[in-house]
Image (cartoon, grey):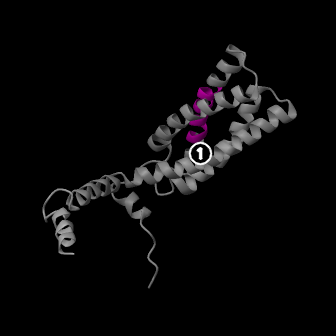
Amino acid sequence: MAGKVEVAAASRPERGAPGNGREELSQLSLIRDIYLRFQVLVHEVAKFGVVGAIGFVVQLGVQNTLHSGFGVGALTAVVIAYGVATVVTFVGNRHWAFKHRKGKGLGHEGMLFVLLNVAGIFIQLGIVALVVKGMHRTDTLSYNVATIIGIGIGTMFRLFTYRKFVFLAQPSGAATEELQPEPSGR
């Protein structure tokens, strides 16, 4: 019995020795510090992603309904679906993803949002046109893959431009305060 206790005690690291939890604490502290430094960006990107996913579902749903269901041309269906998804994503981005940012008003934000989305649709249309017209791949799978690739590239463009030009950053600290939970009043 005593031999088992000695083995267990011998295998336990001493205080201050590697593997005692201090390294893990140090790594967790580093992760926490990095998160705190980029907290606003992490929240914005996550919310932007959720809004974008909703816009993606709206776009593909409208686009496939128009193109496959009603026989609307491939590029025309993309443009119409993109317009519907733009309205959905503007509302989501303005009132949720970037609500803590100071804007220049609904009209200014809306105008810039639409203009940047027009640039974004040309990115997407370019990819779809390359596949459908250039490569003569007219099946639904190729059409949707081209759309997804175009959306992906366009999304990177939109995230950067929305943060830079549409939904302007507040002075340092104000955005972090906005992300803090509301006091419960207790």
Q: Residue 113 sits in which quadrant? A: top right
Count neighbours of disc 1 (C-alpha within 10 A) and say few if under 14, some if 14 to 19, many if 20 or more.
Answer: many
Magenta range is: 112-125
Left or right of residue 90: residue 31: left
Name the residue located 65 percent from the left edge and 26 percent from the top edge.
125
Q: Nearer the viewer, residue 142 or 65?
A: 142
| Above/below status of 104 relative to 62 | below
Say whether residue 116 is left or right of residue 88: left
The C terminus appears in which quarter of the rendering? Answer: bottom left
* Residue position marked by numbered label 1 in the rendering: 52
Along the line of sight, the residue nearer the viewer: 157 or 135: 135
Relative to 133, say whether 58 is above or below.
below
Q: Position of residue 131 (x, y in %)?
A: 67, 20
Quadrant for residue 43, please give it.
Answer: bottom left
The residue under the point 65% across, 27% down is 146
Q: What residue type is labelled 1?
A: Gly
Displayed quadrant of residue 118: top right
